[in-house]
Amino acid sequence: MKNFEFKNPTKIIFGQGEIPKIATEIPAASRVLLLYGGGSIKKNGIYEQVTTALAGFEVVEFGGIPANPEYEVLMQALTVIKEKKITFLLAVGGGSVIDGTKFLSSAAEYQGDEPWDILDQKIPTKKGMPFGTVLTLPATGSEMNSGAVITRAETKQKLIMGGPGLFPVFSILDPSVVSSIPQRQIANGLADAFTHVLEQYMTYPAGALLQDRIAEGIIQTLIEVAPVILKQPSDYKAASNFMWSCTMALNGLIQKGVPTDWAIHMMGHELTALFGIDHARTLAILTGAHYTYNFETKKEKLAQYAQRVWGVTEGSLDEKAKMGIEKTVAFFHSLNIQTKLSDYTTAYEGTGKEVARRLTNRGMVALGEHGTLTPHDAAKIVALAY
Amino acid sequence: MKNFEFKNPTKIIFGQGEIPKIATEIPAASRVLLLYGGGSIKKNGIYEQVTTALAGFEVVEFGGIPANPEYEVLMQALTVIKEKKITFLLAVGGGSVIDGTKFLSSAAEYQGDEPWDILDQKIPTKKGMPFGTVLTLPATGSEMNSGAVITRAETKQKLIMGGPGLFPVFSILDPSVVSSIPQRQIANGLADAFTHVLEQYMTYPAGALLQDRIAEGIIQTLIEVAPVILKQPSDYKAASNFMWSCTMALNGLIQKGVPTDWAIHMMGHELTALFGIDHARTLAILTGAHYTYNFETKKEKLAQYAQRVWGVTEGSLDEKAKMGIEKTVAFFHSLNIQTKLSDYTTAYEGTGKEVARRLTNRGMVALGEHGTLTPHDAAKIVALAY
């Protein structure tokens, strides 16, 4: 096991009917900016629950944060924060709204001239404006971690940010919200969380026996609940396990003491930036290709995964490992998610080289758990996914 | 899944060679009380590493905290804290030293006349004096939770305390310390952590699929490393997984959203108070008896555990469940831990009734995950363990 540090101070409030606790979790006399996305919260009752709970606070609203939270939109919210002397941010939404709120938390306290520098120059956030979240879409895990991904349409960039100052103070997770989520978004959430675990697990054996077991447990849970929740999103047992699994998949715990990959995400972000493909679907496109390309370095963990998670007990290590890849691709298909780039665009030719060019421009020239994958390798992996 | 709240702000610093980080984790200009136990840290090099790291601080030492940390001893330390105007506590030891330090953290800020009231009147600690820990004995999980157990020899009492103010600010976990731990203590640590998981898992199915998987994963890891670490405590891979499993067994995570039992611990504390039997061994004595007595209410989880953890695939649910109990008892035996009270004392007659009497006196009349076990039941369970 590698040495590690772990600290996650976010308070999780989990369960049906917990949204009113906002009222006691936000410090008294806060001036609150309520942030949300396209307005689905006004249809599913969440908006009403939240605003009722906020009755005792001065509240300003900022809606319309888009999927892949957009810098220009967030800069408008930053102006509101400054003009209205906001002291607390409340994100009500999925990963995009929460990530956008994290950018605002950081930007509100940033002393430089140009907040984009936080992303472009990779400036870690040690202290941000305090914020809480009400999660409406299980997927990204942003509700219990300190990272965010922000998009800038103008430059077709999608960059990551983070730091110890960006953990939510609290996050309220009410699984009953799942019943109002469109099936496509549920499928995306399942695929996103599934791939989050894989990026922290499918590397090489590092002697971290417990982390492996927990990672496998999250994956097993997602596999168990996926068909139930897709068929019947109001199934509370499935919804609650789906929601908690998504959070646990990326709250830092399973990546401690182990090597991590994240190449699928790095390449996937480029596919979203280039084609606007849903984040989770870019991961589904690239996972099989990535593991096939890196078969030799990942086959021990692929075989362990095939055996423990999918019950593959027959065959050689190589055969089990290949079954691990096949089972993964089949799982994405079971979610009705296609796994080839050509399923999403006819203009896929040359995408590998374009992704490589963009990664090179960003200095991302050493991907994967060994840091040995070059943009040239990325081009080949993306091409395998056509 | 039941509704839950989860917040654990302790910073874990895990790995070989991490003890020097004490120097940067303790706030500058702190007046530090260094607390430890019987002096084993002076033989295994930990004391030297810690005092070297503390070179920049004013430090007062308080050694001699006994196993089952004793109130009278701790009251002497409290006097030191007040006389020397201590501002930060550093526990270097196992669960007893850390639990004792938690009592001191609470008592140092307590406004009442008699600190024993914190225990006797179950007063939760909202804010304590800040403290860190350097763990030298994996077992109790106290390094990453906010609970403690304190003993008062005078009255033969062993009581629990806790509260959100009692999380360590940081805990340093260096698995290389395991190589110097006597085999008996390693066996105790394995049995203790194992039973911690069981108390949070062996209840009834509550639809918490992920928590079950994580609990099973901790148990599987303990089973995997136990024979290795008992034979070769310097095996770093086994030692690190042993250490991290003990922490994860009782840092709050796996008990969230599920019913918990803890009857084994409540009865076991009485056996320690009455006979001075090692805490972990009291758990090993009572586990089989408790599960046998409560077979009907626990058999579904017992069968799940037998199947997933021990690979028992044959037989009816009842048969699998019984195998689960047998495998558990056999595991304790594999650690060279005896599982009958008569293995430890010849004066066991009447112990069941005495335990019942003591539980009654403390108002503990509704034990178990259903709250239906009376002291009368406890008497029978203890008698089953003779």
Image (cartoon, coloured by chain):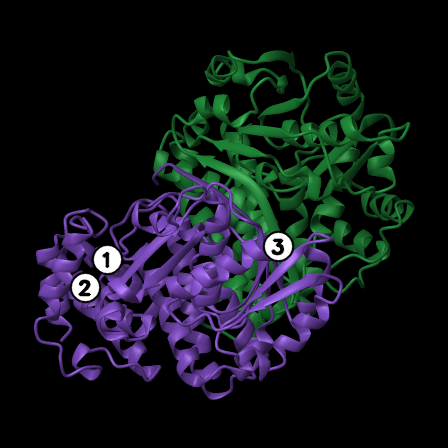
Chain colours: A green, B purple
Q: What residue is shown with label 3?
A: A6
Residue farthest to the bottom, as pictured: B231
Q: Are marks 1 and 2 in contact (CB under 8 Å)?
A: yes
Q: Is residue B21 or residue A162 the one in the foreground?
A: B21
Three-letter amino acid code at the position of disc 2: His
Chain letter of disc 1? B
Task: Say which residue appears at 62% left-offset and 42% top-offset.
Answer: A145
Q: Nearer the viewer, residue A209 or B156?
A: B156
Same chain for the residues under marks 1 and 2 in the image:
yes
At 67% from the left and 32% from the top, the residue drawn is A99
Mark 1 or mark 2: name the one nearer the start of the chain.
1
Q: Which mark lies nearer to you, 1 or 3?
A: 1
Q: What residue type is labelled 1?
A: Ala
To which residue does mark 2 refer?
B290
Q: Name the residue under label 1.
A: B263
* A174 to A31, vertically: above or below: below
Along the line of sight, the residue nearer the viewer: A184 or B341: B341
The residue at the far front in this view is: B83
Q: Which chain carries label 2?
A: B
